[in-house]
Amino acid sequence: MREPAWRKSGKTPDYRFSLANERTFLAWIRTALALLAGAVAIDQLAPNIAPQPVRIVLCVVLSIIGAGLATLAYRRWAQMEAAMRNDQGPALLAGHAAHDHRGGRGGLHLCGIDPGGALNGEARDPGLQPERTTLAWRRTLISLLVVDLFLWRRWLSAKAGAGQISTGIPGLDYQGICALTAAAATIVLGCVVWTRSRQLHHGVEEASAVLMLVSALSIVALGCAAVAAIALGD
């Protein structure tokens, strides 16, 4: 996959802003995973919370919203990166805030950026920004593992013939396909986390748009697997 056209425009932004934007993307992804985890947890651990049709609809809606947030996370990240490259939009306001001693410092601190370093060009961040970003990727992978395990639990604990539809493959039903899809999403995101961690370790601060897109698509795939597993139901 090629990098998008906007990656070739403008200038490379301050790496601290890029990493802050990357961590915001991961926060959106973890929010999506929290919705997916809530959906599969309600479906499996609280079957009597509501009548079955209501419960299924609730869990499916939560899963769809979670998958939608993953796509929104990538779209927002790309918009902010493009804006920073071309000194446009909300990203520019963060740069202007650095000149405001009354309000700018607080806003930049919220992004994990030292305003003193932004103003004076001093090296005030000896590796902490990349380390925080690496940890954010690892937390995201752990969050995905929770959803993955719930989907595997549903498949392995399902009663024979209960809510299962044969695929024609011996030993594998549609619940199994959902579990395997979740496992594939986990492997894909694990590869992204490994690759991005190595990049940050070697000083590559700007994230590849391809890696960000692949990570978002893995969450969408996980959301689809959750919807299918819940809809195939008890």
Image (cartoon, rainbow, N blue to C red):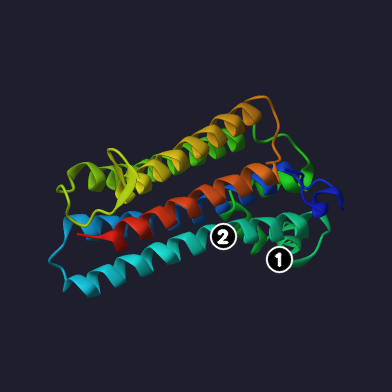
Describe the element under mark 1 as helix, strand or loop: helix
Looking at the rendered structure, the kind of residue marked 2 is Thr
Q: Left or right: where does residue 67 sit relative to residue 113? A: left
Q: Left or right: where does residue 10 sit relative to residue 140? A: right
Q: Quadrant of the N terminus?
A: top right
95 relative to 188, above or below: below
Q: Nearer the viewer, mark 1 or mark 2?
A: 2
Q: Is residue 33 visible?
A: no
The location of residue 171, given as percent across then percent down, is 27, 38
Question: For mark 1, does the 10 Å Cα neighbourhood hold few (<14), some (14 to 19), or many (20 or more) residues?
Answer: few
The location of residue 195, given as percent across then percent down, is 60, 30
Q: Quadrant of the C terminus?
A: bottom left
Of 62 and 166, nearer the camera is: 166
- Residue hosting label 2: 71
- Residue hosting label 1: 90
Looking at the rendered structure, the kind of residue marked 1 is Pro
Quarter holding residue 44: bottom left
Of 123 and 59, nearer the camera is: 59
The residue at the point 37 percent across, 46 percent down is 177
Question: For mark 2, does the 10 Å Cα neighbourhood hold few (<14), some (14 to 19), or many (20 or more) residues?
Answer: some
Describe the element under mark 2 as helix, strand or loop: helix
Quarter holding residue 121: top right
Quarter holding residue 103: bottom right
113 relative to 36, above or below: above
Disc on the earlier residue, 1 or 2: 2
Give the label on residue 47, or none: none
The answer for how far apart the CA atoms under marks 1 and 2 are is 20 Å
Of 83 and 156, nearer the camera is: 156
